[in-house]
Amino acid sequence: MIKTLSELAQFTQKKSIERPDFIAKEIRIEEPGCTETEIQAIKKYLPLMPDSYLEVIRQLNLKGKCIHYFHFLSDSFDDPRTFAEQLIAEHQVGNMYSDIHEQDKVYGVGGWESLSIAVAYQDDPFRRDQIILYDMECAPEEGLEGFVLAENFKQLLILAGNLSEIFYRYRDQHKSQEALLEFQNCLNELYPNRTPETSLQWDMISKELLLDDD
């Protein structure tokens, strides 16, 4: 089981060796991440960005990276800008999530497929540090709602890494139910105090990746 960010980086580096170069570049996460100068630039433009997020991007280089359907910036690894410059630029232009992000006091930091992932920088309506998933596919009359995915950015990456590891280990065995059960056990160990709503979100995410036609 992946339990640290270094273990996550090592796992992605190992898997990248098995993939074509253009895919390897997207999945290989390396250390270190942002320089202290880049961290200070982020803090200047996004002054409420939680330290829990900054600590992760200081350790890991997430520029243009993804863990299966999770991605951490929309720009590619070929973009000449630094991760910090890309992150700042993401908040300089409006998008379909801008209003709800401002209302909920969160900063956008990535996505799952086409959905937005953000980190809460202030308590109420969420707790500071929590990672929130927003679904633009909700019916308009229901309003755009955010769901807690993790208590902090590190926890999100660790859970995503374990989901990926389970996918690779089971993908040719046609044992999707066993894979789902193993991820649930992993979730229970790494995030035992999650809410029923959070469990439903991870159930959706894990089934999207792990279910096959067997």
Image (cartoon, grey):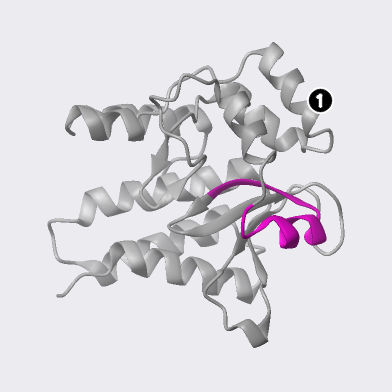
Q: Which residue: 20% across, 27% down?
A: 21
Q: Amino acid at mark 1?
A: Lys
Q: Is residue 203 above or below residue 6?
A: below
Place residue 39 in its image quadrant: top right
Whether residue 124 is in magenta: the answer is no
Q: Nearer the viewer, residue 114 or 62?
A: 114
Q: Nearer the viewer, residue 137 or 162?
A: 137
For label 1, the residue is 44
Q: Which residue: 87% across, 61% down?
A: 124
Q: Nearer the viewer, residue 116 or 54?
A: 116
Whether residue 103 is in magenta: the answer is yes
Mark 1 element type: helix
| Rendered location of residue 122, percent (x, y) | 85, 50
| Quadrant of the frame with the N terminus | top left
| Rendered location of residue 82, percent (x, y) | 55, 20
Please state the extent of the stretch shown in magenta in the rendering: 95-110
Q: Is residue 63 above or below residue 176?
A: above
Place residue 145 in its image quadrant: bottom right
Callout 1: 10 Å neighbours few (<14), some, many (20+)?
A: few
Q: Which residue: 62% across, 53% down?
A: 95
Looking at the image, residue 203 sits to the left or right of residue 153; the answer is left
Q: Nearer the viewer, residue 42 or 186?
A: 42
Looking at the image, residue 21 sits to the left or right of residue 51; the answer is left
Q: Which residue: 50% across, 44% down?
A: 158
